[in-house]
Amino acid sequence: MKNMEILLVEPNETVALPVIDVLKDAGYKVRHARTGRSALLNEPAAVTLVSSSLSDMGIREWVACHQKQRHGGVAIAIVEQDEGILAAETMKAGATDYLLRPFESKQLVNLLRRVEALGKPMANIVAESWRSKQVLQLAHRAACTSASVLITGESGTGKEVLARYVHEHSSRTDEAFVAVNCAAIPESMLEAVLFGHVKGAFTGALQSQSGKFEEANGGTILLDEIGEMSPAVQAKLLRVLQEREVERVGSHKTIKLDIRVIAATNKDLREEVQKGNFREDLYYRLDVLPLHWPPLRERSEDILPISHFFIGKYQDSTQCRLSADAISALSQYQWPGNIRELENVIQRALVMRHGDYITAQDLMLPVALNSVNIPMMQTERFGHVEAKKHAEFQFILDKLRQFGGNRTKTADALGVSTRALRYKLAAMREQGIDLQSLLGSAA
């Protein structure tokens, strides 16, 4: 925490000084900017606290500019008590969280600690986009309570991973985490699976068996795809949530529960309630702390980091990288199957590749690339030399397209020999640029 630097953007010196003192007492390094524009010109900080009382620009505009500059740091809005709508608008613009003024010192420090937790490596979860960081910030808040959580999102977005994140950051982290896929269990068996049964409760019940709720007692239970649960089981689940106790099927003995319930669904439960498919009272019992995982296409900044995560997870001892055309293909694809589809694609590409690079052809995506532009080469330090080389390669590619891949005409247009052009094309391939994929048969 002591290494994290905070930039406070507050025009009022009298308001700023107490906040600076709190931050310094908590061990943070602090810089102070009095205007929004000067803050944008400042060296980026890990966290920027920006006030709604800026005199030179609106806070929503400031957050949008900060997001567009992609500093990589987190923006937190500080707004007045009656500016709830403005707070929501700053979140839509890219703020990770907000504070309502007046606030206690403890609230500020706790918020910063949650932000700091987001910056630490997390097992099986990658969050580079501001939208993902917003969700994790809310998940961290939810973890600090024992209230029920409802996670929504399309199939494959990682709802179970988010549920585990809530559990692991809660006071129950050392207790059991039990996940139940309600859609994968036959309706006739779901009640016994969830609540357990006694010997002889039904045909085939040769011995008593504890249910998933008992197994998760003291910890967390995830009810995945809860929208598929039948009305009869919904009614019994509602009673369990209300009474915090469970009865095994065939028994009248109650078992007390101390448990955190997380439900997940890819359905719109409000709509299901209106259709009569889901109990309204159960919905409100579950929807205490709602979390929504956006689809991967809406958090495109996560695509490449997640791809690299899966490459590291599944590759053999060989160090494998993504070629420039593969990066372009991954970034442009819409990912209807979300992270689950991306994981499958990377696994397949690692099998199909012929060298140290994964190319667009190796990905075998179901749609062709719409663009044949070369993306910026992925280097840790992108400077003038790399930019010049990128521009040169793009110019060569454009000429090749203009002349249908004819090397002689392209060389003449470039003012170089065909031999020199061959060397340039070889250098492009060494950088991972798949000319065959970008130009088709003309390459």
Image: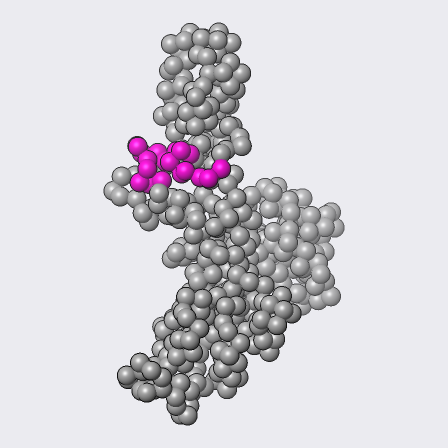
The extreme left residue here reads 317
Where is residue 95 drawn, in percent x and y? 60, 54
Q: Position of residue 190 (x, y in %)?
A: 42, 75
Taking 233 as reference, is 202 left or right? left
Q: Find the residue positioned furthest to the front.
A: 203
User: Which residue is nearer to you in this view: 379 or 315?
Assistant: 315
Q: Nearer the viewer, residue 375 or 74?
A: 375
In the displayed structure, 200 sits above or below 298; it is below
Q: Is residue 252 something that shows in the picture?
A: yes
Q: Quadrant of the N terminus?
A: bottom left
Residue ID at (41%, 13%): 421
Q: Residue furthest bottom?
A: 252
Front position in the image: 127 or 261: 261
Query: In x, y percent, where is residue 2?
Result: 46, 58
Which of the 4 quarters of the picture holds residue 246? bottom left
Region in magenta:
349-367
Residue 31 or 319: which is nearer the viewer? 319
Q: Is residue 190 magenta?
A: no
- State how many labels appear: 0
Q: Residue at x 51, y 84 (%)?
A: 239
Residue 400 higher or lower than 30, as above or below = above
Which residue is found at the position 59% from the left and 59% from the top? 97
Q: How is the image coloured?
A: one colour
Let me know if residue 379 appears in the view.
no
User: Relative to residue 371, is residue 276 drawn left or right?
Assistant: right
Viewport quadrant of the C terminus: top left
Image-quadrant location for residue 357: top left
Task: Indicate yes or no whether the magenta region holds residue 357.
Answer: yes
Q: Residue 204: image x %, image y %? A: 31, 80
The residue depicted at 49 percent of the width and 82 percent of the height is 236
